[in-house]
Image (tube, helix red, strand yellow):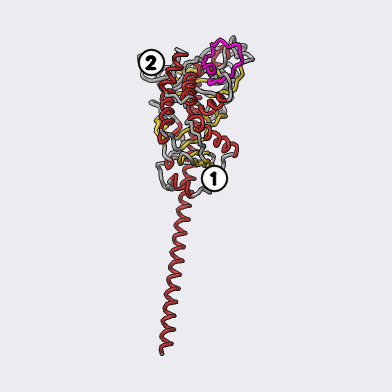
Amino acid sequence: RPWLFVAGHGVVWPKQSHSLINLASEVPFLEDNPPPPHIHSVLTLALRDGATQEILPFLPRVLETVQTQANVIVMCQQGVSRSCATAIAILMCRESMSYASAFADVKAARDVCSPNAGFICQLMELHAQRQDQAKRPRVYRFVPHALHDLATNVLKPCWLTPHARIHATPAQVRRRSNGIYVYSESPLTVFLWRGQDATDANVASATTEVHLWYLHLWGETTMPSVIVEREGAESAAFLSFVQPAALDDATIDFDDVSWTEPPRTRQVEDDLAPSDGLLDSSRKPQLRVIESVDDESWELLQEYDSSDLVPNQVGWLHVPGDRDYIWLGKACNSSWTYDSKPRPKAKATADDNVDLNTLGPILLSSDDITLIRRDREQQLNKQREYQRKHKEEEKRKRDAMAKRVQDEVVNKLVRSEVMFTLLQEHKENNKLGLSSSSR
């Protein structure tokens, strides 16, 4: 296939003009091997090579790009996992190949091909979904990709739990006023629910994504009809399909901290080194990253390697029972601080002329670690408080709705009783009239 190439950052660039799909935009190119002018970037994505990274939501736009270009280079940092998984998906969708056949072809062309377990799982799901419509997700959210890529919105399937690939049913998904949700009602009908705070631009983008999924990912020749449902003005057909239950506590709130926050086997706070000074190897170190002190919170990476240490971020590596490290990217200001105190600089050296960007990992004092943990806890408390207020507001709305329904029922009963009384009086009057006539 002379039109498709897979490469890593150490590639020997071709001399002819090619289009570049960069899957690892967070990782800078090698200083001595940047793309030459005749290599044109046509699509840039910020995928990470981890078992929890979703790849299917990005394939529709990848396939759309490939279809419009002549010669395409699919690139990630090493050219082993992300780019190879994407190349396999391209062959599966463009040439209707099975996962096994597509993998064999890519492996034959690039012997280092080795997608991670998460990508393999998703590619096998893709094969099953292309063969059987019943295995496709029923509900999607149109949301930002991740904390490190908030500008990129994609359609994400709704799962019952963050790490179990079991599709949620339409009745199990709780909708939010700022959200956009897509429901696959049938092969030819899709409901797109928009909250009152959703923007027209995002609705248009979500509609386009739906068509790209059907066209490229599943190879459907007939596009579904996308019916837009507005919050508060939903059609009877939509309400019947999602089976709403006002007091149903089984629905999933995908913005809830308890759902989005990955479970931790042990709390990070106040871990102490064992008395013998040895590190407990059964407890995995935890890496969190953040781009600025204004971010909502540190992002905990479940799977990570050196490629996650990117120039524009700060990393916090917590080694349970041992120590904590802070890593500063090259693009980060050396005065990156908490509470406006340049703590890393003060702790690193007494020489003000030292450039902290040239330093390696910085070992923090217990005061610094306490400060970072306190900041993290404050952020979590804010999120919990928001969730608490949101749930109270939802309960207030449910109670108000129940009260309105109750009032309507009472009014109907009162009206019915009044009508019954009037009918009885009418009958009595008729009887009296008949009696007078008979005399």
Residue 412 in the image: x percent, y percent?
45, 63
Whether residue 270 appears in this view of the structure is no
Indicate yes or no whether the magenta region holds residue 356. Answer: no
- The residue sitting at the right extreme is 37
Instruction: Give the residues drawn in magenta, as a range.
Output: 1-25
Residue drawn at x 48%, y 50% is 236
Q: Which of marks 2 and 1 is nearer the N terminus?
A: 1
Residue 227 in the image: x percent, y percent?
53, 43
* SS assignment at label 1: strand
Q: Nearer the viewer, residue 222 or 281?
A: 222
Instruction: Identify the main secondary structure in magenta.
Output: loop
* Quadrant of the image occupied by residue 314: top right
Figure quadrant of the C terminus = bottom left
Residue drawn at x 51%, y 23% is 47
Residue occupied by mark 1:
230
Please rate how many residues cluster around mark 2, counting C-alpha atoms within 10 Å: few if below 14, some from 14 to 19, many from 20: some
Task: Report the mark closest to the observer, 2 or 1.
Answer: 1
Indicate yes or no whether the magenta region holds residue 11. Answer: yes
Whether residue 95 appears in this view of the structure is yes
Question: Which dot marks residue 279?
Answer: 2
What amino acid type should be assigned to the residue bearing mark 2?
A: Leu
**Relative to residue 66, is residue 388 depicted above or below?**
below
Residue 356 in the image: x percent, y percent?
58, 14
